[in-house]
Image (cartoon, rainbow, N blue to C red):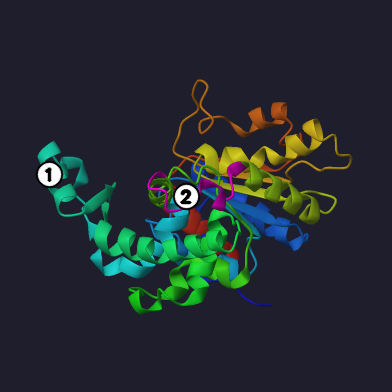
Amino acid sequence: MKQPGNIKQFITKHFRHFNSAALLDAARAYEKHLEDGKKMMITLAGAMSTAELGISLAEMIRRDKVHIISCTGANLEEDVMNLVAHSYYKRVPEYRDLSPQDEWELLEKGLNRVTDTCIPEEEAFRRIDRQIYKFWKKAEDNSERYLPHEFMYELLLSGVLEEYYDTDPKNSWLLAAAEKNLPIVVPGWEDSTLGNIYASHCMKGEILPTTMKSGIEYMIYLADWYENNMAKDGVGFFQIGGGIAGDFPICVVPMLIQDLKKPGIPLWSYFCQISDSTTSYGSYSGAVPNEKITWGKLDIDTPRFIIESDATIVAPLIFAYLLDI
């Protein structure tokens, strides 16, 4: 019998109580979910791409341990930004000590800060902007319309960015997803740098808003995917952070059941959320999983977990457990 990997052994031995025990329980349930032949969605909120979650997530994709992803527009683009401009990023470990003047000086240098990491505007945003516009315009000229992630897949698979690769491409989760044509849902894509850039091209009369498919079309896309992949027990839901990346896709199940009146639609069959948002009043990110039962998203018996910790620590550990490394 194959011995478990070092990280898996370490987690199993040492993670016994509180958030560490919740992590182990969630990892074991995720593993059983896959062993039972069920599929899993992962949702990405926050700045997970800038935090280089792709180092572990890309391998999860390659090994078929995730079957669909929901992410913010920022996470969609920032994985590619890191791919083409990694060495230009600036880490600011002393970010808590920065004054407003320090922040302004970073802006003047073209550095946009995300906690302890600054994204270089010229090398990251502009390299992608100059190339992606060509694909947007080509689609419009051909009277074609695509979803945001489909344009990003076309951009990556075309090879036009390869000359700019600035880190190991095996660490890009979006490139791994593109190579597998993994389904992706990007609710609220407009709330991203490329979304803003796209809007600016529309306002200048250079491209039509309708060339880019909408969030409603993403919900239809997701509903079709869920029906074709739910089997009899439903799909699992592994949520990193909160917000629209999680709230949008989890609603597809009650929509199918309550609004479309479709028979035989199973609820989500596994739920785990990694969040540092404490339980609070009216907050989606701070809602305990049981609340989702009242909304027709989870069943009474759905395995459900909440790990109240930093996702940049927790998610790579769970992925390492599942990858048995």
Q: Check the image and report above or below for 218 versus 64.
A: above
The chief SS type of the magenta part is loop
- At horizontal 74% and vertical 35% (from top left) the residue drawn is 255
Q: Position of residue 127 (x, y in %)?
A: 33, 65
Position of residue 300 measured from the top left corner of the image (x, y, whole percent): 76, 34
Q: Residue at x 64, y 28 (%)?
A: 291
The answer to whether residue 268 of the structure is visible from this angle is: yes
Q: Which residue is mark 1?
A: 102
Residues 204 and 54: in front is 204
Does residue 9 appear anywhere in the picture? Answer: no
Rounded to the nearest whole Å, what is the CA distance between mark 1 and mark 2?
A: 28 Å
Q: Please tell me which residue lies in front, 247 or 208.
A: 208
Q: Quadrant of residue 117?
A: bottom left
Q: Residue at x 70, y 46 (%)?
A: 220
> Which quarter shows the N terminus?
bottom right
Extent of the magenta region: 203-215
Mark 1 vs mark 2: give the one in front: 2
Secondary structure found at label 2: helix
Q: Amino acid at mark 1?
A: Asp
- Label 2: how many residues lie within 10 Å, few (<14), some (14-19) or many (20+)? many
Q: Is residue 131 left or right of residue 89?
A: right
Side of 42 where 82 appears, left or right: left
Using a 10 Å C-alpha cutoff, classify the residue at mark 1 as few (fewer than 14 neighbours), some (14 to 19) or many (20 or more): few
Q: Position of residue 307 (x, y in %)?
A: 52, 42
Residue at 77% x, 56% y is 229
Instruction: Answer whether residue 237 is magenta in the image.
Output: no
> Is 302 on the left-hand or right-hand side of 74?
right
Give the structural element (helix, strand or loop) at label 1: helix
Does the magenta segment cover residue 214?
Answer: yes
Residue under numbered circle 2: 73
